[in-house]
Image (cartoon, grey):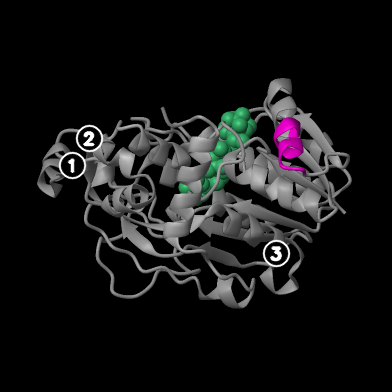
Amino acid sequence: GRVLVSGASGFIAKHIVAGLLGAGHTVRGTVRNAEKARQLRQTMQDHAVPVNRLETVEADLLQDEGWAQAAKDCRYVMHTASPFPQSQPNDREALVPAAVGGTLRVVEAAKAAGVERIVLTSSVASVFYGHERKRATAYGEADFSNTQSPHISAYAISKTRAEQAAWASVQGSTTQLTTINPSLVFGPVLDSVTGTSAKLVAMLMNGRLPALPNMRFGMVDVRDVAEAHIRAMGNKNAAGRRFIVSSQTLPLQALAPIIVAQYPELKKRMPRLTIPDWTIRMAALFSSKAAMLADEVASDRILDTQPAESILGLHFRSAQEGVLALADSLIRYGLVE
Ligand code: NDP
């Protein structure tokens, strides 16, 4: 059956497209313009992925045009497209029209086309944000971020509301839904067009981050995230489930020694300072952007990845492997000066 992949030009999506084409599926990828389509095809060819079963169509999350046509004759839909800006907009609702509106356009088109299952790229941003900072038990499938909290970012609001809109929309429909909820995604980029999470490591390697906040993030390799999507597509036990995909949780400060061990010449570019928690908490009194950050400072969340391991059979690559594979690929594609 044909698989529709929305946002096929994205960092994670390119790994999904490569995996699907490699397994012999017919893939229809949506992109925002013809240049992205050309680039996607080129990247697949550069990685020796067959492109004879790759179709591309243009569609934008903010517009109705193209989605019904895109979903036609597809058995599965992977909905990966969603705005993921490098810095948070001031307006808490700024990303909602594309994230929620776009998700509803994709899900409605999938239902109308009789699609069997939608696999939605959600996030841990839909799981644990806007809740009290410390909790001894793991966050899992039943948890949704609190979009009413003053401490939740515009991005987390957009991801949470988009996922909730998707669940509401498939209620009572024959089209099934599965969500993949990754933590911070590292691992190799397939070309020189990176996403926001890969840019974080590129900035670090280019000496653009003089100081880091005291934050811990779950990390996961993009190859495992792509594999999760592909396994979720055809696994009957995955219908109606939300899968958190994450390897270790590490402080941002742990990235530097991992990179320096492999690339000692980059040592002088690594951040020497940790932004003290109190400066962020002070700034939070005056700036809504800082308030969104403040909730994450010094937080440490435990994530329940057991369903992804037992139902999808995933064995996560270590955070270190993901960071190093990303660093290697950034150098390979000339993204480190
Ligand atoms: P990218 O920025 O590479 O991918 C985002 C994709 O969404 C791109 O294909 C982009 O298109 C597309 N997109 C954005 N806005 C629109 C729009 N208005 N219309 C159509 N397409 C649009 O980042 P990732 O690959 O990391 O992100 C993919 C998904 O994974 C997102 O849903 C993100 O929220 C989620 N995610 C990512 C994590 C991470 O750490 N990377 C962690 C958890 C979840 P274009 O190529 O034209 O810009």
Q: Amino acid at mark 1?
A: Arg
Residue at the spot 47% in from the left edge and 58% down from the top edge: 321
Q: Which residues are magenta?
A: 41-48
Classify 317 as above or below 112.
below
How far is the residue under mark 1 from the one under mark 3?
A: 41 Å
How far is the residue under mark 2 from the one under mark 1?
A: 7 Å
Cβ atoms at labels 2 and 1 below 8 Å apart: yes
Circle 2 crowding by C-alpha within 10 Å: few under 14, some 14–19, many from 20: some
Which marked residue is nearer to the observer: mark 3 or mark 2?
A: 2
Secondary structure type for disc 3: helix
Mark found first going from the N terminus, 2 or 1: 2
Question: Disc 2 designates what residue?
Answer: 210
**In the visual, does 116 lie left or right of 119?**
right
Question: Disc 3 designates what residue?
Answer: 231
Q: Is residue 42 in the magenta section?
A: yes
Question: Disc 1 designates what residue?
Answer: 272
Classify 71 as above or below 145.
above
Mark found first going from the N terminus, 1 or 3: 3
